[in-house]
Image (cartoon, helix red, strand yellow):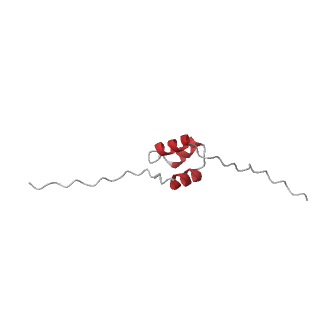
Amino acid sequence: MAKKAKPQKKPRTKRSWTDDDLSILKKMAGKEPLAKIAAALKRTPGATRNRATMDSISLSTRLKKRAKATKKAS
């Protein structure tokens, strides 16, 4: 029996990060989910997360708790 030919994989291409890509990442970080940011940049979620980590950009979309104000005793 002849073996079936395996489908060829697309070769990986490495695209460098432009200043426009980084500004989009910074604007959307913390406001949009990772998948949406990655789609806007036309990159994988892993590549987007990795770059955000390298540039110390938080992708967390959780609401930040504010410190409760203390009432002054009168």
Quarter of the image with the C terminus is bottom left
Rendering coords of residue 51 (x, y %): 55, 52
Residue found at x 59% / y 52%: 47
Image position of 10 (left or right of 5): left
Image position of 60 (left or right of 70): right
Rendering coords of residue 25 (x, y %): 51, 45
Rendering coords of residue 29 (x, y %): 47, 47
Whether 9 is drawn above or below 21: the answer is below
Q: How many marks?
A: 0
Quarter of the image with the N terminus is bottom right
Residue found at x 37% / y 50%: 63
Rendering coords of residue 62 (x, y %): 41, 52
Q: Nearer the viewer, residue 72 or 3?
A: 72
Residue 73, located in which quarter of the rendered image? bottom left
* Residue furthest out toward the front: 19
* Residue furthest out toward the right: 1
Q: Nearer the viewer, residue 41 or 15?
A: 15
Residue found at x 46% / y 42%: 27
* Residue furthest out toward the bottom: 1
Image position of 11 (left or right of 63): right
